[in-house]
Image (cartoon, grey):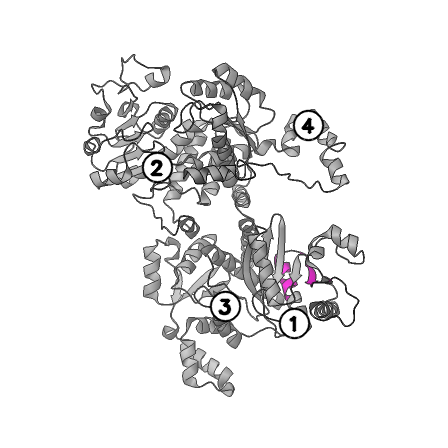
Amino acid sequence: MKEEALHYHKKKPEGKLEIQSTKKVDSEWQLSLAYSPGVAEPCKEIAKNSQTVFDYTGKGNLVAVVSNGSAVLGLGSIGPLAAKPVMEGKAVLFKKFAGINVFDIEIKAKTVEEFVTVCKNLEPTFGGINLEDIAAPECFEIERILEEEMDIPVFHDDQHGTAIITSSAFLNACHLQNKKVDEVKIVFSGAGAAAISCAKLLTCLGVKKENITLCDSVGVIYDGRTERMNKYKQEFAVKTQNRTLAEALNKADVFIGLSVKDIMTPDMLKSMAEKPIVFAMANPDPEIHPDLAKKTRSDIIIATGRSDYNNQVNNVLGFPFLFRGALDVQAKYINQEMKLAAVHALAELTRKTVPHSVSKAYEGEDFQFGKDYIIPKPFDLRVLTSVAPAVAKAAMDSGVARKPIKDFKAYTQELETFQSESRAFVRGIINRVAVYNSKSKKPVIFLPEGENEKVLRALNTVVQEKILEPILIGSQDKIKKIISEFNLIHLKKVKIISPQQESSFKDFVQEFYSMKKYKGMSLKQAEDLMSQNNYFGSMAVYKGLGDGLLTGATDSFVNSVLPTLRIVGSAERNVVAGVNIVLLKNKVLFFADTAFNIDPTAQQLAHIAIYTSQMAQYFHIEPRIALLSYLSFTDKKDQLGSPLKMKKAVELINKWKPDLKVEGELQADVAVNKELAKELFPQQTFNKPANILIFPNLDSGNMAYKLAQQLGHGEVIGPLLVGIKEPINIVQRTCTVEDIINSLILTALKVHAYRQNKN
């Protein structure tokens, strides 16, 4: 760990942060806009109206992480320089989980006054300040003064972040252990900033102050104690004869440790009440080891601050999302109502079905609400869309929001764009399908692989959007067993069919036999094939019993698509192709053919380009087609290979669809770079780069999208089928749950597109 951690931070570029421009500065004109003289215009607007700073600068999405290094993690007072790696790490988490930009600021401030002066002078730059790793009791005074005297949110994460996550886990643990919040007795080991803040927030949840006992290195904080006391500890001094941690823990319901390793012994744990709740959160080593705790008490729920054990109380579940909600409503400060909103949002999210994407991030471990899962995982993307809106609404309801959110549904959907390009793209498709559904019936989609866990997990997510009606094909018993095993609660009413048990089975067999009897198929062969889910599902779509079909998760691409081709067939041009949608930052590209035709002819390429342009139009994207080759606009009549083939394909497209914007043959760099294209080939007609890239063969198309995915960090959806008579898509056998979700949603959109074409 030591060597890897040092290498991780030291490899070039050193550290964990860099600055990137959000606007292009690639020409003299752009430079004049970014700086002199153009930059004077927003300066003048801000001088006239200070609120426009949020319109013309990044202040509204910029947070300062400020520390003097006086209480860093478990390292103590190591100073501002040594604290910098931690603050950079904090900045990375803000950006990763909530899309918030951060400058880490480490200061040589030894007194409260020095620290406050620095932070107050930072107010014009930042939309919020996150105080970090500051020793108690100074941290309390610093935060109090800054909250009173600054007009932007100030938040000490070591206090409130820990309190929010602890409180959420506490609510769920009490629920599971059948303990009433207003009756539980809680003992703290530790009486610093985090412990006192936790105690305060727990009282807001209904815990009685007289039921809370704080212990520090001296012992119990009792009424009348004078040694090593301050006004913050005094607030929780209780009347008791207990003087040690061991005495306080006798018959206690809850232990919350924010102190040092191994301070809790097995005997102390044995003395606690039935079904104890233990939060041993000292880092890196907890107050009692989880394995030892579970060996001592089988009825325990235990949480730690470590990621290698269940129930990690991790501050990353709090501060990015709390600030996201606060910044988005331009809150004056972060109040108790906003913190409590975050607590309840996290607690409620934990009780919902956990997406497979979370399991994948944790090496396939399955998570369900219970003793080993009382708080969400940081890589659960739903945390952002659950906590930030709750915080924003609480800010509005409590009167501290200066920019209220008018449409929370739209706001929640906007938050998804912080998480990935594909989520933003697919969210737009979901909204479009919902609009179409309001005007016509929902698409009915068959899923022949109904017994597959990945398919069921994906469907459990999609049905919550209420944009399609799924029909699962498979064994009812097997499907229901998987639904129950993985708690896929949204699938309990989904329709399940089994081919041979359906009244239509014999008619389907006869129909298929009639199609193929002159091609050597016997009635028995037709019956055997129709017993297979893919054949039955394809026939159901062909006969109009459903609108679309999605398959491929359990078999090869060829085997999955064959039933569709044999029953549904290709469209009038007799060309089927695979299209991958490649999502780069602020850019959507369509790559074809990436899955089907090994060496297509010029005529086939023209059809593929036309089909792909129709797909782009499904998404309301104006198609600009480039036929790619290793040469651009060659004049050689005897040119062999792709240039000649692509040139012919362009001629055919212009003949069949003269309204389409198409260029070729083009080299790939020319196709996607408008400036380069104009410089080298002023005759080309694109005013923007191409967004549909047609490749000369399967090799180049398949390689290109995978390179874009791996080297260009593009997100890829597909392949999606074009050229099929009905809305049918095939996922790859290596697909993820997220891939299936995306393909299901795109298939629903495809249904509506086909309906419009028929009309």
| Marked residue nearer the N-terminal end (1 or 4) | 4
Mark 1 and mark 3: Cα distance apart in space: 20 Å
Residue picked out by circle 4: 46
Q: Which residue type carries mark 1?
A: Gln
Does residue 620 belong to the magenta stretch? Answer: yes
Residue picked out by circle 3: 557
| Marked residue nearer the N-terminal end (4 or 3) | 4
Mark 2 and mark 3: Cα distance apart in space: 44 Å
Q: Nearer the viewer, residue 366 or 750?
A: 366
| Marked residue nearer the N-terminal end (1 or 3) | 3
Instruction: From this view, report whether residue 289 is shown above or below residue 588.
Output: above
- Residue 606 in view (yes/no): yes
Residue picked out by circle 1: 604
Q: Nearer the viewer, mark 2 or mark 3?
A: 3
Label 2, secondary structure: give it: helix
- Would you call the spot at circle 3 few (<14 residues within 10 Å), some (14-19), or many (20 or more)? some
- Would you call the spot at circle 2 few (<14 residues within 10 Å), some (14-19), or many (20 or more)? many
Residue span colored magenta = 611-631
Instruction: From this view, report whether residue 174 is shown above or below residue 551.
Output: above
Q: Nearer the viewer, residue 178 or 220?
A: 220
Mark 4 and mark 2: Cα distance apart in space: 44 Å
Instruction: From this view, report whether residue 653 is shown above or below residue 18.
Output: below
Q: Which residue type carries mark 4?
A: Ile
Q: Which residue type carries mark 3?
A: Phe
Q: Residue at x 69, y 61 (%)?
A: 625
Mark 1 and mark 2: Cα distance apart in space: 59 Å
